[in-house]
Image (cartoon, rainbow, N blue to C red):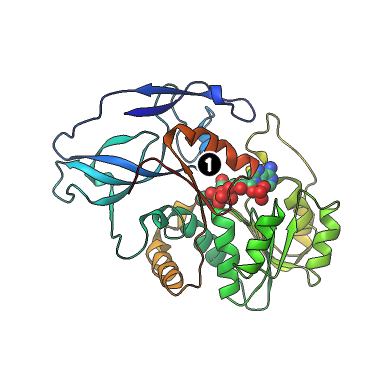
Amino acid sequence: NRQVVLAKRPKGLPQEDSFAWREEAIPTPSEGEVVVRTVYLSVDPYMRGRMNDTKSYVPPFALDEVLQGGVVGRVVASRHNAFEEGDMVLGMLGWQDYSRVNGKHLRKLDPSLAPPSTALGVLGMPGLTAYCGLLKIGEPKAGETVVVSGAAGAVGMLVGQIAKLKGCRVVGIAGSDEKNEYLKNVCGFDETINYKTESSMRDALRRVCKDGVDVYFDNVGGSISDDVLLLINKGARIILCGRIAEYNLEKPDLGPRPQTLLLIRSALMKGFIVNDYAHCHDEALRELATWYREGQLKNRETIVQGLEHAVDAFLGLFRGDNIGKQLVQVSEI
Ligand code: NDP
């Protein structure tokens, strides 16, 4: 049973030597427990925060302990009455081939409803984040302009598509032409900006947001967000979902301070954690599943094969390697 542990706390961008490998025997379940073979492992930007020894909304990863993440897997042994061998399940499990876990921490998946990997994407945490953040905080109205950064990632791609379903004009910001073409041609975004090649983000934003910005779904922070905020309309809603441009900074990036604009435009800026909206998750999953089944929501995935590439897949999030949800396939379904 191969395992990835946190070897040392990274400074700045994590390097391969922040991680180490261990091997142990495949576990067997005790009473109430289940052993799960990892099929898909989710790598997520928030894991970078858990590598620091700082207080946050989830505790830091411990040194020399197996890293944790969202896993879709298959039950290979069960001593819990709700699960039997062969079941597909979802849980927060280890970066490892096999996990031993109390059955109460698992959710059974029905593969006849949707491909199991969707439980880590459109019908999982990224889907809930996009839905709750956009609709419960952003409250977009038909005809409004919605801007989303990190637009070609797991969350951003869904935010833009949901905003389109609500009749909005959607502008996506992402880091490659390939990503932007996908957003326009497949996801129906109205406009896109490649922040890596655009010489002036301010000019580019002004060009595509002629009526200003009513809703900004912020996945990245940093200077991209400073530039978007210059264009907010009266009563704009700004959803602080993520700050990936800042996760690897060793010193805080102060940047311009947009509070005056929030004040004079009577705008709302609200941060959130997807679990704050647990009361909306059933509604969100129902609607996301309906849109997905009807083909109105695309669930694009980038899948790296092999647990041995999990660290690189995680680091790839900061290089922008992924289009849609980044997964690692650890074993065959
Ligand atoms: P993504 O699938 O969007 O992957 C990360 C993407 O971020 C990359 O593909 C890359 O795309 C982009 N990126 C990387 N570095 C930078 C940078 N310096 N500046 C701008 N863009 C960058 O990840 P998720 O969809 O899982 O998460 C998106 C954001 O939402 C993250 O910040 C994450 O932490 C946050 N989040 C928050 C949740 C909450 O409850 N609040 C829950 C889930 C996620 P590109 O090629 O465009 O650069």
Which residue is labeled 1 in the image? 46
Give the image quarter of residue 268: bottom right
Task: Respond yes or no on whether mark 1 lies under 8 Å from ligand 1.
Answer: yes
| Residue under the point 45% across and 32% down | 308
Q: Is residue 267 left or right of residue 84?
A: right
Nearer-the-camera pick, 2 or 261: 2
- In the rendered image, is residue 306 in sight? yes
Residue 296 on image: x %, y %: 50, 73
Give the image quarter of residue 290: bottom left
Q: Is residue 150 left or right of residue 310?
A: right
| Residue under the point 62% across and 51% down | 219
Residue 206 on image: x %, y %: 83, 64
Give the image quarter of residue 243: top right
Residue 176 on image: x %, y %: 70, 52
Number of callouts in the render?
1
The three-letter code of the residue at mark 1 reads: Tyr
